[in-house]
Image: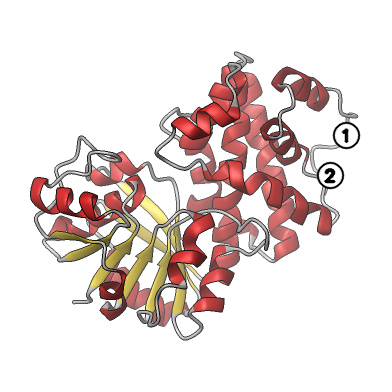
Amino acid sequence: MSNIGVLGSGAWGTALAQMLASDGRDVLLWTRDPELAATINTERHNPLYLPDITLSDTIEATDALPRMTALDVLLLVTPAQHMAEVMQRMSVFPRDLVLCSKGIEAGTGRMMHDVARDIAPDSAIAVLSGPTFAHEVAAGLPTAVTLACSGGRTQWQRLAATIARPAFRPYYSEDVIGAEVAGAMKNVLAIACGVVDGLALGQNARAALIARGYAEMQRFGDALGARRETLAGLCGMGDLVLTCTSTASRNFSLGKALGEGRELAELMHDRHTVAEGAHTAPILVDLAHEHDLSMPIAEAVRDLLGGSDAREIVAGLLARPLTSENRA
């Protein structure tokens, strides 16, 4: 049985640790905060991120990063913009690194698998992504995800035996780029759908936005070499539908609040959790421009986060020239 750890004690990292410990397996959970580590170990709760979940006795929290290097499998669940900084503090890496954060690194445009490969070239990289709300995974509700493995089926066989649980079902893929593209883009599109909800524009508008946003995801994925079947699967369309339709989504709830007229600075200051789409949108648009791609919804989210008025942005989208739905 592999030694397994989770790097990051937010809601998603804690939920993954709880899921992995559901069969009695020992799981090491790293947190930056020594006080939170002590609370988890003594009170079996993460009061800041998953207060309603009683954590398994086989989860051990630690703030000692060197302890994570001795594991066989490490799930990286730090916010995307901080993953490189945390990894650079490690001198040795486990054989398998499973990336569970979704985003694009601001300033460099690197996907998370590129960040991990640059820092830990000897590790096999996998990406875990799909329609997952942390509180449901922690509660043991049925969940299916994509597990994209750069090491092919050999790595998949190792990881599936380690990660799969009766209520947590991974599906194999070798399309790491597709899983990353889908995970990063759905956060941006969820902000847009939240704005539609905040402006009370109706469910017709939201459904249309999801469909047109998916078209942008396909265009961006094509440019980066993703497979369309990956984008149509759990980590693409599955996650897109989930995060674009519920206030349990951090990105959707951020967009909803912006649509209701609240200020971005206020919203970001008040949040314990990270809405990765807010960091991803500007760099996503920059990359789209580099590839000469039309991505008006992503551009609208970037402009909104830059301070533009939500109603004016929506009016601009509705005023775009009519064209074919199947336009590339």
Q: Residue furthest top?
A: 200
Q: Look at the image and tell me in which quarter the N terminus lies.
A: bottom left
Mark 2: few, some, or many residues within 10 Å (few <14, many ≥20)? Answer: few
Which label number is shown at residue 293?
A: none
Q: Is residue 282 above or below residue 110?
A: above
Nearest the camera: 284 or 149?
A: 284
How far from the left and from the top, in percent, is residue 87? 44, 70
Residue highlighted by disc 1? 323
* Disc 2/disc 1 C-alpha distance (Å): 7 Å
Residue type beneath disc 1:
Thr
Q: Is residue 99 above or below residue 314?
A: below
* Residue 50 sits in quarter: top left
For image coordinates 57% across by 18% down, the residue present is 198
* Residue 212 sits in quarter: top right
The answer, for residue 175, to whether it is visible in the render is no
For image coordinates 60% across by 15% down, the residue present is 202
Secondary structure type for disc 1: loop
Give the colouring mode of the picture.
Answer: secondary structure
Which label number is shown at residue 327?
A: 2
Residue type beneath disc 2:
Arg
For image coordinates 39% across by 45% down, the residue present is 132
The answer, for residue 82, to whether it is visible in the render is yes
How far from the left and from the top, in percent, is residue 297? 72, 36
Q: Are marks 2 and 1 in contact (CB under 8 Å)?
A: yes
Q: Is residue 93 above or below residue 82?
A: below
